[in-house]
Image (cartoon, rainbow, N blue to C red):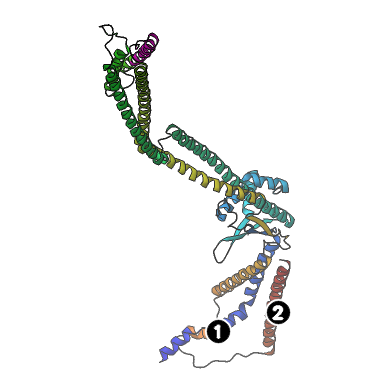
Amino acid sequence: MAEAFETDNQERPDFARYLDIARRRHIHFLVPLLLGWLVVWGLSWVLSPRYKSSTLILVQEPSMPQNFVIANVADDLQSRLQNMQQQILSRTRLLMIIDSQHLYSDPHHPMNDDDKVAQMRKEIAIDLVRDTQNAGVTAFRIDYSAHDPRVAQRVTGELAELFINENQQTLLGESRDTTKFLDTQLEAARNALAEQEAQVKAFQASHMGALPSQEASNLQILSGLQSQLQNEQDALNNATQQRALHQTEIQNFRSTLPPPRTDQQDPNGVEALDARLAKLRDQLTDLETRYTDNYPDVQKTKLDIAETRKLRAQAVAAEKAKGANSGLTPEQSAALVQLQGQLQSDEVEIQNRQRSIQALQARISDYEARINAEPASAQQLADLTRGYEQSQANYNDLLKKQQESQMATNMEQMQQGERFTMLDPPSLPARPDFPDRFKFCLMGLLVGVALGGLSVAGFEFTDDRLHSSSQIKDLLPVPVICEIPEVINAADEQTARKKTVLGWAMAATVAVIILAGSAVSFIHG
């Protein structure tokens, strides 16, 4: 039971001892506290102040609705801002600002251009402002720190103007490049379409009559030509039969006439020439069934027929002139002349029918060749048409994109697209951003408390004196039975009261000094 009581006493904090230490060591705590605070607080007034100027630039959406005009630039605003930041914070741009504002021109601390650029980059801060819903960039803030607040304001304004102008030039440049690229592609597509169209027209011109669209008309014309050929062949057969009939009638009529006065028949007479013509016609018919019109024997036979017809006509005229038929009565002579005229008409009709049949056969062969060539022509025309349709679709698509890109470029030129707007102009800082004297005051207080605590701990650790009865009891091997009370006179009481008053006065003085310094730091920044 006693051991448990002793353990509880050891675990409880000895507040009386701590109060005794505070009473005896308050000077050792207050002096380091005040000195530490004064050093840190005084440092805040020694350091050169820096003023920060800020401006907020709003990313304004296009004023033209997206369903009317579609922008033809990249929508990744963050990547575009990073590219612009690299361009604006480049060595050339920053040196221009440094020279125009005469920055870092301290003769006591000269700096080269690279050091100036590096220092200025450290003093520039760009922070993005995102939307809480879709995490998109809605604005960004530009900060710049300088020893002079007006210089900080001017430099921040120049940086903001650079971002606004660079964004406008970037959007307009990208839009123009896109439109120029589409113009080039559209011209190439137009040339390809014209070439395809020329090929289709050339093919249609070279295969006129054998195109798939003309198949029905070709079949109809071929059917009509075949009907005409059949009619001509029927008419030729009728004319051939009429010629044979008239020849038979002439022969029968001549057989009734009295024999000629001479025993030998004239080889150039009408009858001999008629027999010769009949023989040549049979020979020509036989040759035409085996050979073409350009065959030599066919041409020679045609020439013989023409010559024989000429001789026969001359013979008929001679008989009429000489009165070869003078032995005939006038009625018989007229009947013979009529039969010969009919026979000659039959010859003319047969020749006309034969020429017509040849022409029809040539036309039929031509249309049959057209119809036979239509499948191959249809395949070739389909290939050409397919290429032409693809080129036309590509051209129409590029034309639509080019028109949309041109409208987007015009929108950027009119500054109706996405643009940066300075929402807050660069501020003129009234208080320095660094050093924050109030923060330095708090830091000085923490440093003073730490130094005071270390001082008290050090003095207590090096002090080997006993300051309380409990310390004496702890050193004795046996328990104390009785104690002799301390006799305190009036002088001791007065001395103790003076020390207490002096301690509280010093603590109050330190507190007043720290509070006054904190108030000054808070007011003057």
Quadrant position of the N terminus in the picture:
bottom left
User: Could you give the CA–CA distance between mark 1 and mark 2, rounded to whole angstroms?
Assistant: 23 Å
Q: How many marks?
A: 2
At mark 1, the secondary structure is helix
Q: Give the number of the disc on residue 368.
A: none
Q: Position of residue 33 (x, y in %)?
A: 64, 71
Q: Which stretch did the figure color magenta?
A: 305-325
Write the residue at 52% across / 38% down: 188
The residue closer to the viewer here, 309 or 369, is: 309
Does the magenta run of residues contain 319?
Answer: yes
Asked if residue 423 is positioned above or below residue 377 in the image, the reply reads below
Q: Which residue is mark 1?
A: 15
Tell me the amino acid under the disc marked 1: Phe
Does the magenta run of residues contain 173?
Answer: no
Asked if residue 483 is positioned above or below residue 50 in the image, the reply reads below
Q: Would you identify the image quadrant in which residue 295 lies?
A: top left
Write the residue at 53% across / 39% down: 190
Asked whether, in this view, residue 86 is left or right of residue 279, the answer is right
Q: Would you identify the image quadrant in which residue 18 lies?
A: bottom right
Determine the main secondary structure of the stretch shown in magenta.
helix
Q: Would you identify the image quadrant in which residue 156 lies?
A: bottom right
The residue closer to the viewer here, 248 or 5, is: 248
Write the residue at 43% across / 31% down: 206
Q: Give the number of the disc on residue 505.
A: 2
**Among the two numbered marks 1 and 2 on one chain, the one whose residue lies closer to the N terminus:** 1
Q: Can I make out residue 223 in this image?
A: yes
Write the residue at 42% across / 33% down: 207
Asked if residue 495 is positioned above or below residue 274 in the image, the reply reads below
